Image: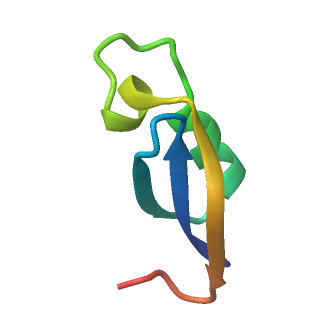
Amino acid sequence: MTYQVYILQNASGRFYVGQTDDLDRRLASHNRTDKTAGKFTRKNGPWSLVWSEPHSTPPA
């Protein structure tokens, strides 16, 4: 399994750093707008992927 460490950025210049084993699914989750009491990324999106790096083991 491959893991990704990634950085997202929104239109106001804020960054978000995360890790996942499914980058496409995770980016879609961050950009969901159907939950009104969402997490930080749902309230501050939309987000664009600006960097990612694959790893063969989960980041510590």
Q: Residue at x 63, y 36 (%)?
A: 28
Residue situated in front as seen by the camera: 17 or 4: 17
In this rendering, the answer to whether 25 lies above or below 56 is above
Image coordinates of residue 56 in percent, x first then y, are 62, 89
Counting labels gives: 0
Residue furthest out toward the bottom? 56
* 4 left or right of 34 in image: right
In this rendering, the answer to whether 10 lies above or below 49 is above
Q: Residue at x 41, y 36 (%)?
A: 41
Q: Residue at x 32, y 35 (%)?
A: 40
Say if residue 22 shows up in the picture: no
Q: How is the image coloured?
A: rainbow
Q: Residue at x 60, y 72 (%)?
A: 4
Residue furthest out toward the front? 12
In this rendering, the answer to whether 13 lies above or below 19 is above
Image coordinates of residue 51 in percent, x first then y, are 63, 67
* 60 left or right of 47 in image: left
* 41 left or right of 49 in image: left
Image coordinates of residue 33 in percent, x first then y, are 51, 16
Say if residue 46 shows up in the picture: yes
Image coordinates of residue 44 in percent, x first then y, are 40, 29
Among the 4 quarters of the image, the one containing residue 60: bottom left
* 35 left or right of 28 in image: left
Residue furthest out toward the right? 24
In this rendering, the answer to whether 18 lies above or below 15 is below
Q: Quadrant of the N terminus?
A: bottom right
